[in-house]
Amino acid sequence: MRVNLLRRLVTALVFLPVLVIVARAGGGYYLVLIGLGIGIGTYEFLTMLEARGMKPYKVLGTLCALLLGWSAFYQSYLFTYLTFTILLLALSITELSRRTEEQAINHIATTIFGAMYVGWLMSHLVLLRELPYAMGQTYSTGTGYALLPFVLTWSCDSAAYFFGIKFGRHKLLPRISPEKSWEGAIGGVFFAVIAGFVYQQVYAHFLSWFDILVLGFFVGVLAQVGDLVESLIKRDADMKDAATTIPGHGGVLDRFDSLRFTAPMIYYYLRFFAAR
């Protein structure tokens, strides 16, 4: 366990400065960073489905997932509609070229789900960085928006992990993730809120204490829901990690499992309730 924790620490020390620098730069730099996460994560997910005997279209699914991130960057609803249309039509037409009609629904559905589950949900990280354009704010404000899901989500994940080790007595969902406990879950929610208040003072003065309380609570809950959903899928595929891309963390899919659920919630809350 100590070796794994050391690997996690080293990975974090390398990635976090890069994330902060690129988030501050924004624009195409941030799009490329998140695009790498979307592309690699989607490919890992569709590859994992193959272990379950499914036959998704990995290249097509990954390309469409990347297009969703691209459409988020340009704030283009039309481009998003076009991406979904291309995905559906291309899958349907490509399926006709298979030598057998067996599992046609399976092939199409798994590819669409992979593009949506990874590409669509993670594209909200791009939307957060570009949020100032929609709100009539200075572009530099987007740095605070962009880093918010990472700070809250990873604070929750870390606290839930250590609280679970130290105080875990009551299992949360043992059939899906035997190591997770209610004590860890509560600790995760609590520290997501605490991290939110600290972040507000340092980087997010545009948020009220009420905004932070709401965001911290729901991020704390959804981060762990996202983790459990990922565990459910990997358990079905009989895999511990989606890949070994990131030392100490498994794959990109594993590292961003919670963020796929928290980033959309943060974006829509800021878009409709908090951002002014």
Image (cartoon, rainbow, N blue to C red):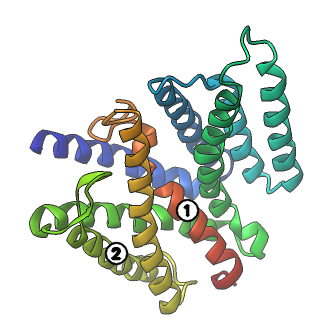
Q: Distance from label 2 to label 1 (Cα)? A: 16 Å
Q: Left or right: 61 with respect to 209?
A: right
Neighbour tally class for label 2: few under 14, some 14-19, many 20 plus, Cα within 10 Å: many
Identify the residue under disc 1: 263
**Residue 255 visible in the displayed image:** no
Relative image position of residue 36 (x, y in whole percent) = 56, 37
Neighbour tally class for label 1: few under 14, some 14-19, many 20 plus, Cα within 10 Å: many
| Marks 2 and 1, the one that precedes in the sequence | 2
Q: Quadrant of residue 185?
A: bottom left
Q: Left or right: 24 with respect to 57?
A: left
Q: Quadrant of residue 91?
A: top right
Label 1, secondary structure: give it.
helix
Identify the residue under disc 2: 189
Q: Quadrant of the N terminus?
A: top left
Q: Left or right: 83 with respect to 251?
A: right
Q: Nearer the viewer, residue 138 or 97?
A: 97
Point 81% across, 17% down: residue? 96
What amino acid type should be assigned to the residue bearing mark 2? Val
**Residue 43 visible in the displayed image:** yes
Label 2, secondary structure: give it.
helix
Relative image position of residue 249 (x, y in whole percent) = 31, 41
Q: Nearer the viewer, residue 104 or 64?
A: 104
Point 66% across, 72% down: residue? 268
Point 45% across, 71% down: residue? 219
What amino acid type should be assigned to the residue bearing mark 1? Ala
Q: Are marks 2 and 1 in contact (CB under 8 Å)?
A: no
Q: Left or right: 166 with respect to 114?
A: left
